[in-house]
Image (spheres, helix red, strand yellow):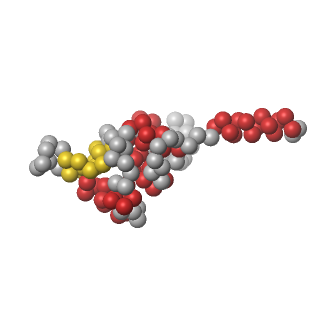
Amino acid sequence: MNGSDKNADLATVESNLIARPSGPDPTEKVADLLADFLKTGGVRDLSYCEKWCEREGMNLSNDVLVLPQTTICKSRTGGKKGTKVVWLKAITWAENWVRYYDTVRGHHKHMVPRKEISGNRNK
């Protein structure tokens, strides 16, 4: 491999890297939660988020809700007596960080098909 081939390969690798998004960095663990929000429409019950964070070794208030309220915040559906939820307000911001940390969760139509274990069954 000569020098120009190495430079071409390096350029290809660099073009495949995702640039660091702008805005506050949610961390990789929080980006995984953001991927879940993106898949389900951007709103989740507060209790679901608390359990998810606990399972992942995080604290919702200290790790997620410290982000600016313009990105994600607690809210209620339907006024004062409504259900407590966590609301992802900045969809584009979340999409960029989920892509950056590679925590994207595909829709069931976009999942990679399972490989056949026993080969071709149509023989």
Query: Residue at the location (13% across, 44% down)?
Result: 79
Identify which residue, 83 or 61, lies in the foreground. 61
Identify which residue, 114 or 2, lies in the foreground. 2
The residue furthest left is 81
- Quadrant hosting residue 107: top left
- Quadrant hosting residue 64: bottom left
Query: Residue at the location (52% across, 48% down)?
Result: 101
Query: Residue at the location (30% across, 59% down)?
Result: 50
Q: Is residue 39 visible?
A: no
In the picture provided, is 89 more to the left or to the right than 7?
A: left
| Residue 62 x %, y % | 37, 61
**From the image, which quarter does the C terminus lie in?**
top right
The residue furthest right is 2
| Residue 43 x %, y % | 28, 44
Q: How many marks?
A: 0
Identify which residue, 100 or 24, lies in the foreground. 24
**From the image, which quarter does the N terminus lie in?**
top right
Q: Is residue 49 visible?
A: yes
| Residue 13 x %, y % | 69, 40
Query: Residue at the location (71% across, 35% down)?
Result: 12
